[in-house]
Image (tube, rainbow, N blue to C red):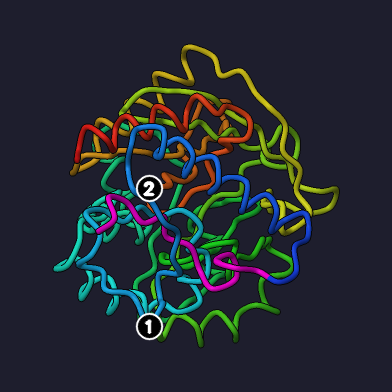
Amino acid sequence: MYDVVILTDYRYENPKKINWYTQQVLTEDKILKKSLQKKGLKVCKKNWNTKDFDWAKTKYAIFRSTWDYFDRFNEFFKWLDRTKEKTKFINSSDIILWNIDKHYLNDLQKQGINIAPTIFIEKGNKLKIGDLFKETKWEEAVIKPAISGAARHTYRLNKNNYNKYNDVLNELILEESFLFQEFLNNITTDGEISMMIIGGKYTHAVKKRAKHGDFRVQDDHGGTVETYSASKHEILFAEKCIKLCPNKVVYARVDVIYDNNNKISLSELELIEPELWFRNNEESADLLAEEIFNLI
């Protein structure tokens, strides 16, 4: 019987080839495993989709590097539904189902959280990008799926280039909902701030910057990461976002960008499998282990 299973995907369970990116993932999971073991907990690491593991043999399973699920949503949702009857998830299946769909941004906006100006386009609707630009009078926009990850089907649009995306986006919207958001210029000039929140409290932060000529800040798209000291205002904003979630949040990453009016805005609330940069602050892994120990 295990106390905690650290959930990963098939690429990071026992990789044969290790490059710099894979090594980062392995390091992060190793730091958390060590912190959990220091609390006397029995821990292992498993591919979430493994076929030969009885999930009833662990008290908790914590989502860490399950980064193939957004290419396999149907399979993942079925697994989640089956497995939640056998073990408890961290974060919980309820918060995962809320957070996996970016309509949660609308929920938080209704409670006073500033987000980028956004129009939600529901599945099956006809997408007329030109009409959206006329309606909003935005110079640039980003369009992305409501359920996504790693910048999947995320496009930067303007009044001159949107036509070349019309056909592909109208095909995609037959199967899934999308967000049409005003492009925030600070993403290319000053980057995105990611704040780690453990047990509702801020621990540390990083700033992610896109490579020249791009707007995607993820390192697998050429982005870079630097340590960052969040201001009191930024910390209070991040912690407020977590307080307004509909269920308990054990760990989180709050991604923020300053909008085109230079007001702090929530970009993403990452409650499922966010990179938490334990390698920048190993004490935060100890704090997470303490939170989990108290649950057990």
Q: In the picture shown, does residue 261 fall above or below 276?
A: above
Q: CA distance from mark 1 to mark 2?
A: 25 Å
Query: What is the tally of numbered marks visible in this picture?
Result: 2
**The C terminus lies in quadrant:** top left
Q: Residue at x 60, y 80 (%)?
A: 166
Q: Which is nearer the N-term, disc 1 or disc 2? A: 1
Residue type for callout 2: Leu
Residue situated in front as seen by the camera: 120 or 51:
51
Residue indicated by mark 1: 51
Is residue 5 a member of the stretch shown in magenta? Answer: yes
Q: Which mark is residue 271?
A: 2
Residue found 67% across the figure and 52% down from its top: 218
Q: Choose top left, top right, bottom left or bottom right for residue 161.
A: bottom right
Q: Residues within 10 Å of mark 2 (few under 14, many from 20)?
A: many
Q: Amino acid at mark 1?
A: Lys
Could you tell whether 76 is left or right of 70 in the image? left
Q: Residue at point 47% right, 44% down?
A: 33
Which residue is drawn at the image coordinates 45% and 59% (left, top)? 45
Magenta segment: does it hold 58? no
Residue 135 sits above or below residue 199 on the image: below
Say if 5 sits above or below 275 in the image: below
| Dot in front, 1 or 2 | 1
Q: Which residue reaches farthest top?
A: 232
Mark 1, Cα crowd under 10 Å, few <14 / some 14-19 / many 20+, is few
Query: Which segment is the magenta one?
Result: 1-15
SS at badge 2:
loop
